[in-house]
Image: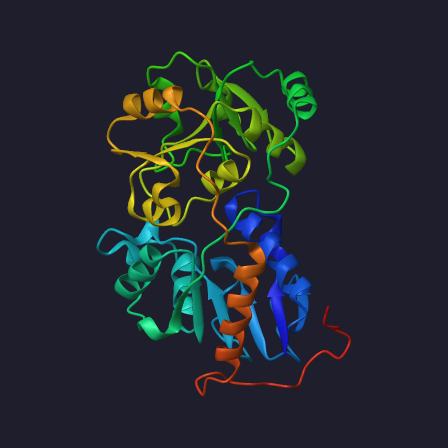
Amino acid sequence: MNVAFDSRAGKDSRGVGRYARSLLSALIASGRGGVIETHSPQPTRVDVYHSPWLEGALLHSPVPMVVTVHDLIALRTPGALMRRGLRTRLRYMATQRAVRLIVPTAVVADDLMRALQLPSERIHVIPEAADPVFSPRPPVELEAVRKRYRLPEQYLLWVGGLKTPDPHKRIAQLTRAKRSLPLVLVGPSGPWAHKLPDVTLTGEVPDDDLAAIYTAAHALVFPSSDEGFGLTPIEALACGTPVVACDVPAVREALGERAELLPANDLDALVRAAEAATRPAPAPQRWSWDDAADATWSVFESAASDPAGRICHAGVPELQARR
């Protein structure tokens, strides 16, 4: 089986990019089929096209299409789809035409069924995982990142995108919460983030540095009021760092008892719990990107054999599958 994979998503600095890069690598390493990285979604001479993000969903795919939907937070309110821009509405319309859909949690699956009127048999829940680069780092690496990014000896940590304010991430509210430990924010940042009070911004960092920053943190704080999964807590746990998060459905499903979950309406309590956190952190999940790749290949096989999919073998001969 040959699969066209929209690798444009891997350039995204958010969790979508991490998902695309990690899954693509694991799909290729599995040896279960050929993977064609496409930077312009024109899937040809393949059995299945996989878009690992909403942006790559096609209204008219010449082959069976699989789309990964990471969350539907923007569509939770009634009538939200009609209020979105035309381009976004077209993306969701294209998603409705996918032969199979992959979601990270059952919470997102329920959202898909409700918001886009999709049948459950077309939706597959495949959790995300920590990339192998995320593991506890030795003291020499911790000292190096402290010097490189001017980090305090003890700190609370948040990791994510800071280019524009994201209401459900609640970063501004987190900075106003009462705390005694410094707060470090890691991720690509825009001008608004540099106006946040009393925080250390590192900007975007290489993965090896990020693993060390995770390891050195006293705890990871995750104040989101809504999520489709929550990948940074999974990465923090893989580095041996305790996680304190808001108790929202998808985060509860993804983390279970491995994190301390607090009511979403009290960020002061969230910070207090994070400052009181102790090591060792609970063991990380055993689910890996290799497991996710195996499950994803099964979805590809199901999509390719579905009568609803239209197979087209005419196309561009120079595309070569990677095995």
**Residue at the limit of the structure toward the right, as seen here:** 318
Q: Would you place residue 122 above or below residue 192 in this image?
A: below
Q: Would you place residue 30 above or below residue 271 in this image?
A: below
The residue sitting at 50% across, 26% down in the picture is 185
Q: Quadrant of the N terminus?
A: bottom right
- Give percent across and percent down for residue 227: 36, 45
- The image's colour scheme reads rainbow
Q: Is residue 11 left or right of residue 197?
A: right
The residue sitting at 28% across, 69% down in the picture is 117
Quarter of the image for residue 142 reads top right
Q: Quadrant of the C terminus?
A: bottom right
Q: Is residue 320 left or right of residue 264?
A: right
- Give percent across and percent down for residue 132: 62, 46
The residue sitting at 44% across, 37% down in the picture is 282
- Give percent across and percent down for residue 124: 41, 67
Q: How many marks?
A: 0
The residue sitting at 49% across, 18% down in the picture is 155
**Along the line of sight, the residue nearer the viewer: 184 or 43:** 184
**Residue at the limit of the structure toward the left, as seen here:** 78
Q: Is residue 137 left or right of residue 74?
A: right
**Along the line of sight, the residue nearer the viewer: 101 or 88:** 101
- Give percent across and percent down for residue 234: 48, 42
**Along the line of sight, the residue nearer the viewer: 39 or 233:** 233
Quarter of the image for residue 123 reads bottom left
